Image (spheres, grey):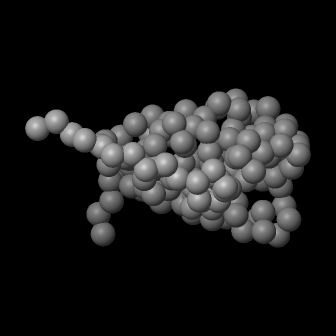
Amino acid sequence: MHLTEREKEKLLVVVAADLARRRMARGLKLNYPEAMALLTYEILEGARDGRSVAELMQWGRTILTEEDVMEGVADMIEEVQVEATFPDGTKLVTVHRPIQPKGENAAGGAGPGEGPRADVVNGSLGRVADKVVGTP
């Protein structure tokens, strides 16, 4: 198997993120490299899942809180920049202050595909049917 340097880097991120998840599952707090790997992995996968840059910038702030990382790690990570591959090319995704203070989570901690569905969010608002007419 022949991998490019970029592909090797992505695989290294996947392995490091997997280790971070396993440690979190055991109740351990993440150190700087583990937190960066997990944030990077989630952004890369979000792009692969079809999320937009804007969605990833917001969602990237919901992945970790200060409760998930060792003391001082949140202050060390002021921003995360990831070159992610989208259907229309590679784009730079920047997430500012990705690790939220204790007890906060910008979007309730929902991961890819875990957020509320439109019919649940809109609840009793109902639907509006409009006729859309295109021009020839």
Q: Position of residue 65 (x, y in %)?
A: 80, 46
46 relative to 95 in the view: left or right: left
Question: Residue at point 40% right, 37% down?
Answer: 91
Q: Is residue 37 visible?
A: no
Outermost residue, left side: 136
**Between 58 and 63, the one nearer to me in the picture:** 58
Question: Residue at point 75% right, 33% down?
Answer: 76
- Quadrant (top left, top right, bottom left, bottom right) of the N terminus: bottom left
Question: Residue at point 81% right, 52% down?
Answer: 68
Query: Across the whole image, how many numbered discs are drawn on residues?
Result: 0
Task: Classify 115 as above or below 97.
Answer: below
Q: Position of residue 78 (x, y in %)?
A: 70, 30
Question: Residue at point 54% right, 42% down?
Answer: 55
Quarter occupied by residue 90: top left
83 relative to 14 in the view: left or right: left
Q: Position of residue 81 (x, y in %)?
A: 54, 35
- Quadrant (top left, top right, bottom left, bottom right) of the C terminus: top left
**Between 79 and 104, the one nearer to me in the picture:** 104
